[in-house]
C-alpha cells in the first residue's frame, strides 16, 4: 500500500513539469504558426504584384506588336486593336495591385491616348508605350523595395523563431528549477507536514527560502500549527485531569460496590440470625409458659419462697432473651429495592465500565447483546448480582489468560443471562448440592457471593443454573421474569 502511494505521488510530481513543458511547447507552436501566417500575408501581395508586373509586360508586348504592324505610316489603327489595348489597361486598373500611387493615373492617361483618333497610330502607340514603360519601371522599383522588406522581415522572423526555440526550453528549465526549489519543494513539505498533523506532530516550515508569493501561506500555516500545539497540550492536560477524575470516580464506585457487597453479606448474616432467632424463640416461648405456670402454682401454695424468687428471676431472663430475639428479627427485616423499568444493555454497559478496573489485562471481558431489552427489575441488586458472578469468574481463572463472556437474550417471557468463564469449573459437590451461605470453594472466600445471587433470584421468582463446559470452563445462567411487552 505504501509503495502504491509513493508511486502515485511520483507520477503526480512528474505531471507538473510535463504539463509545463507541454504548455510551453504549445506556446512555441503558436508563435511559429503566427510567424508563418504573417509571412504568408506578406508573400501574397508580392505574388499579386508580380502578376501585375507580368500583365504590364504582356501589355507592353502587345503594344510593340501592334506598333510593328502599323507600317506603312499611312495605315490606320484598327478598332479591334484599340479595344483590346484599352481593355488590357482597364484590367490592370481593376486589379488594384499597384504599389505606386501614380500607376492608376498613368493607366488612365494611356486609355485617353488610345481614345485619340486624330493622331497617327505610331504616335498613339509610342506615347502609350512610353507611359506604360515608365509605369513599369516605377512598379519594378517598388517591387524590389517590397521584396527587400520581405527579405528583412523573413530574417527577423527566423531570428524570432530561433530565439523562441532556444529561449523557451531554457526558460522552461529555469522555471522548473525555480518551481522545484521555491514552490514545489515547500508545498511538498507542507503536504507531508499536513499528513503528520494527523499523528499530532506539530512541526513548523522554515520560511527563509520560501517564494514571497507563498510566504503568507506558510506563515499562516506556522501560526496554525502553533495554535494547534497549544490546543493539543491543553487537550492533553484536560484529558489527564478527566482521566484522573474518572479513576477517582471509579474507585469511589468500586468502594460503594464493596460497601453494597458488605451490606449484602450483613443481610445474609441477618437472615441467618433471623432463622436462629426464630428457631430459638419458639422453644423459649414454651419454657416461658411452663415457668409462668410453675410460678403460679408455687405462689398459691405459699411454699418454697426461695425457689419462687429464683424461678421469678429465670422467667424474667427468659422474657429478656425473647425480647432480644424479637429485636434481632426486627433488624433482620429490610425493605426490598423497588422494581423499575431498566434497559438491560445500558445497565450492563454501566456495570462493565466499573468492572474493567477490577479485571486484569490477561482476562478479556466481552459482552454480546442480541436486542435492546427492557425489564422491571431492581437495578442495583441486578448489577450487584452480575458483579458477584463476574468477580467469581475472575477469581476462578486466576493468572490464566482467557475471557469472560456475558450473553443476554430474551426467551419465553424471561430474561436469560449467561456468564461463561474459562476457569477450572464448579466442583461436583457444588453442582450436586444446594447453594449454602458461608460455604466457599475458593481460598479466603466468604461463601456469600453465590448465596446473595441465589437469594436475589429467588426473591424475584427467577432461576439460577450452574454448569460446567468441556473441556474447561463454567457457566452461570440467570433466568428472570421479563414480559415480552417490556423489550424492543
Image (tube, rainbow, N blue to C red):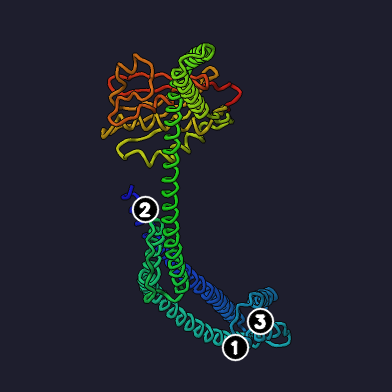
Marks 2 and 3 sit apart, C-alpha to C-alpha, by 96 Å
Pointer 2: residues within 10 angstroms few (<14), some, or many (20+)? few
Marks 1 and 3 sit apart, C-alpha to C-alpha, by 21 Å
Whether residue 274 is visible to the viewer of this picture, yes or no, is no
Q: Residue at x 47, y 29 (%)?
A: 369
Identify residue for label 3: 75
Residue at the farthest front position: 302
Between marks 2 and 3 in the image, the one whose residue lies nearer the viewer: 2
Pointer 3: residues within 10 angstroms few (<14), some, or many (20+)? few
Q: Residue at x 55, y 31 (%)?
A: 337
In which image quadrant can residue 28 be found? bottom left
Residue nearest the viewer, comparing 191 with 220: 220
Between marks 2 and 1 in the image, the one whose residue lies nearer the viewer: 2
In which image quadrant can residue 263 be found? top left
Identify residue for label 1: 130
Dot 1 falls on a residue whose secondary structure is helix
Q: Residue at x 56, y 74 (%)?
A: 48
Pointer 1: residues within 10 angstroms few (<14), some, or many (20+)? some
Marks 2 and 1 sit apart, C-alpha to C-alpha, by 81 Å
Identify residue for label 2: 8
Residue nearest the viewer, comparing 82 with 112: 112
Horizontal arrangement in the rendering, residue 484 relative to residue 211 (left or right): right
Q: How many marks?
A: 3
Whether residue 388 is visible to the viewer of this picture, yes or no, is yes
On screen, 336 above or below 166?
Answer: above
Amino acid at each position: 500500500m505504501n509503495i502504491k502511494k509513493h508511486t502515485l505521488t511520483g507520477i503526480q510530481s512528474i505531471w507538473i513539469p510535463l504539463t509545463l513543458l507541454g504548455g510551453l511547447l504549445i506556446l512555441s507552436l503558436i508563435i511559429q504558426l503566427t510567424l508563418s501566417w504573417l509571412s504568408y500575408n506578406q508573400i501574397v501581395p508580392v505574388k499579386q504584384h508580380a502578376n501585375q508586373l507580368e500583365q504590364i509586360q504582356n501589355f507592353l508586348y502587345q503594344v510593340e506588336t501592334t506598333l510593328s504592324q502599323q507600317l506603312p505610316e499611312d495605315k490606320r489603327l484598327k478598332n479591334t486593336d484599340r479595344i483590346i489595348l484599352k481593355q488590357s489597361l482597364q484590367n490592370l486598373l481593376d486589379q488594384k495591385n499597384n504599389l505606386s500611387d501614380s500607376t492608376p493615373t498613368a493607366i488612365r492617361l494611356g486609355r485617353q491616348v488610345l481614345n485619340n483618333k486624330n493622331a497617327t497610330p505610331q504616335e498613339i502607340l509610342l506615347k502609350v508605350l512610353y507611359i506604360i514603360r515608365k509605369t513599369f519601371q516605377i512598379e519594378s522599383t517598388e517591387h524590389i523595395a517590397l521584396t527587400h522588406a520581405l527579405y528583412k522581415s523573413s530574417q527577423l522572423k527566423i531570428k524570432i523563431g530561433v530565439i523562441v526555440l532556444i529561449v523557451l526550453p531554457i526558460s522552461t528549465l529555469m522555471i522548473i528549477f525555480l518551481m522545484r526549489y521555491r514552490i514545489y519543494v515547500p508545498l511538498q513539505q507542507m503536504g507531508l507536514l499536513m499528513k503528520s498533523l494527523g499523528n499530532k506532530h506539530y512541526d513548523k516550515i522554515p520560511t527563509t527560502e520560501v517564494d514571497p508569493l507563498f510566504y503568507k501561506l506558510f506563515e499562516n500555516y506556522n501560526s496554525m500549527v502553533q495554535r494547534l500545539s497549544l490546543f493539543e497540550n491543553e487537550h492533553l492536560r484536560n484529558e489527564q485531569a478527566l482521566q484522573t477524575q474518572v479513576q477517582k470516580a471509579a474507585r469511589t464506585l468500586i468502594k460503594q460496590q464493596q460497601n453494597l457487597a458488605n451490606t449484602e453479606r450483613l443481610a445474609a448474616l441477618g437472615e441467618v440470625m433471623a432463622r436462629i432467632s426464630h428457631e430459638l424463640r419458639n422453644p423459649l416461648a414454651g419454657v416461658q409458659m411452663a415457668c409462668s405456670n410453675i410460678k403460679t402454682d408455687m405462689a398459691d401454695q405459699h411454699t418454697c419462697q426461695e425457689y419462687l424468687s429464683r424461678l421469678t428471676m429465670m422467667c424474667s431472663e427468659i422474657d429478656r432473651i425473647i425480647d432480644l430475639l424479637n429485636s434481632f428479627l426486627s433488624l433482620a427485616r429490610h425493605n426490598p429495592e423497588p422494581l423499575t423499568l431498566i434497559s438491560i444493555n445500558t445497565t450492563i454497559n454501566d456495570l462493565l465500565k466499573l468492572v474493567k478496573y477490577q479485571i486484569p489485562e490477561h482476562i478479556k471481558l466481552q459482552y454480546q447483546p442480541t436486542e435492546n431489552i427492557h425489564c422491571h427489575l431492581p437495578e442495583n441488586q441486578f448489577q450487584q448480582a452480575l458483579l458477584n458472578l463476574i468477580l467469581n469468574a475472575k477469581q476462578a481463572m486466576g493468572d490464566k489468560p482467557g475471557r469472560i463472556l456475558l450473553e443476554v437474550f430474551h426467551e419465553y417471557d424471561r430474561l436469560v443471562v449467561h456468564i461463561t468463564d474459562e476457569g477450572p469449573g464448579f466442583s461436583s459437590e457444588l453442582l450436586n448440592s444446594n447453594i449454602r451461605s458461608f460455604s466457599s470453594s475458593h481460598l479466603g472466600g466468604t461463601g456469600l457471593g453465590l448465596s446473595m445471587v441465589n437469594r436475589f433470584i429467588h426473591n424475584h421468582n427467577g432461576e439460577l443454573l450452574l454448569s460446567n463446559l468441556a473441556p474447561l470452563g463454567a457457566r452461570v445462567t440467570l433466568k428472570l421474569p421479563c414480559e415480552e411487552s417490556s423489550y424492543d
